[in-house]
Amino acid sequence: MPRRVPRSAIFSNVTGDAMKRDFHSVLVVCTRRIGDVLLATPVIRSLKAALPHVMIDMLVFEGTQDILSGNTDIRRVWTIVERPGLRPHLALLGALWRRYDVALSVLAGDRPTFHAWVAGRYRIGTLLPDKKSWWKRRLLNRWIPFDNLLTHTVAMNLQLLAPLGIAPCGTPVVSWTDEDARAVCALFPDIRSGQSYVVLHVSPKFAYKTWTVAGWVALGQWLIDRGLIVVVTGVDSAEQAYCDQIIQGLPKAVNLIGQVTLPSLGYLLGRAALYVGTDTAVSHMAAAVGVPSVVLFGPSNPVKWGPWPKDFLSTARSPWHKQGSQRQGNVWLLQGEGECVPCLAEGCERHVNSLSECLQRLSVHRVIQAADAMLRERENSGAAPTSV
């Protein structure tokens, strides 16, 4: 472990709110979904870019840590189950107790704030500016007002760096190892042939983010007729019948549904000519590696959750407006049909297993138009497959 110094020496004021940055270890707490973990990586990249000597760890939910595999900015990943038993939770708290000079919580919830308090001798977090959060404010040395509507998640997370005087870097970090790359090549040997391919990520984790089987099949066939290899990926889950229908409709496609890890998927995306997907962590990955991406958005708020385009210049505002299909950098965000879009609900029946009518009504013609524009732009630029 790096040497520890008194907190007063670490965090004496320099100018205004900027803290003296003589610290050696940081824990970033992000106990939520995979996409949330990925969108916290700009915080880590920013810290590492400004202070290469600092050792940075993360605390995440078990099952989300694969998105960090191969990320050389991170020394160690701690995991905790969503509902831990008393004894393992106490053991974790004991292991984390005041272990870090600084702890950052990118979430405004009770447990992440508590975990930051346990782990850090100096704590910064995001919190709702309401009366109920009074006790959490007492656990933190500094807190940033949490905005769930008008501030993108990446920009929200990066605000935690201001008290430390760290310059923000915006693009999420997608990483993989040589072993991950070899795994993809074994499943998809044509990746080395130089022939252009498109990745269709057809099944998100939740049903309310899905598009139609007919739409995916028509889009995939159009791409195949254009001379492209179509690679279909997705979550191997309860939606297996949905995925099977898509694969049956695209017998010439390469089926990698449920066969690649997230890091391997990062390598696959990094060399693709085009990506098409819905509101998932994989769409954030595609945007981050720079592949031309068409992303289908339904009830979710794009201001908060739209994929962050690679090298988007501003880290203080969202790349996206709340309503309307729009383009930023390598990402074309297509919003579903309906005056209610985005309703911010989880499906028309208000639960994650219900469908969203706005996505069911999204025409394949619109998706093909966007895909065609992206492919033509790439061809006109003479771009070769990306090697990231």
Image (spheres, rainbow, N blue to C red):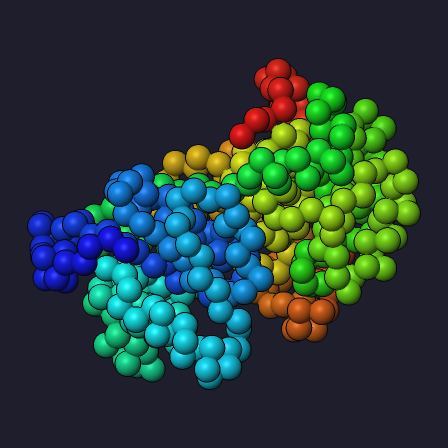
* Residue 28 occupies quadrant: bottom left
Q: In the image, is 37 to the left or to the right of 170? A: right
- Residue at 34% of width from left, 68% of height from top? 96
* Residue 64 occupies quadrant: bottom right
Give the image location of residue 354, x and y in percent: 72, 69
Q: In the image, is 133 to the left or to the right of 14? A: right
In the depicted structure, whether residue 160 falls above or below residue 62: above
Give the image location of residue 284, x and y in percent: 55, 47
- Residue at 44% of width from left, 77% of height from top? 89
Q: Pick the residue in front: 159 or 196.
A: 196
Q: In the image, is 79 to the left or to the right of 191? A: left
- Residue at 71% of width from left, 69% of height from top? 353
Number of numbered callouts drawn: 0
Q: In the image, is 32 to the left or to the right of 158? A: right
- Residue at 78% of width from left, 61% of height from top? 239
Looking at the rendered image, the quarter that the C terminus falls into is: top right
Give the image location of residue 113, x and y in percent: 35, 71
Which residue is most to the front?
A: 1
Looking at the rendered image, the quarter that the N terminus falls into is: bottom left
Give the image location of residue 17, x and y in percent: 15, 55
Residue 8 at least partly seen: yes
In the depicted structure, whether residue 348 falls above or below residue 294: below
Residue 106 at least partly seen: no
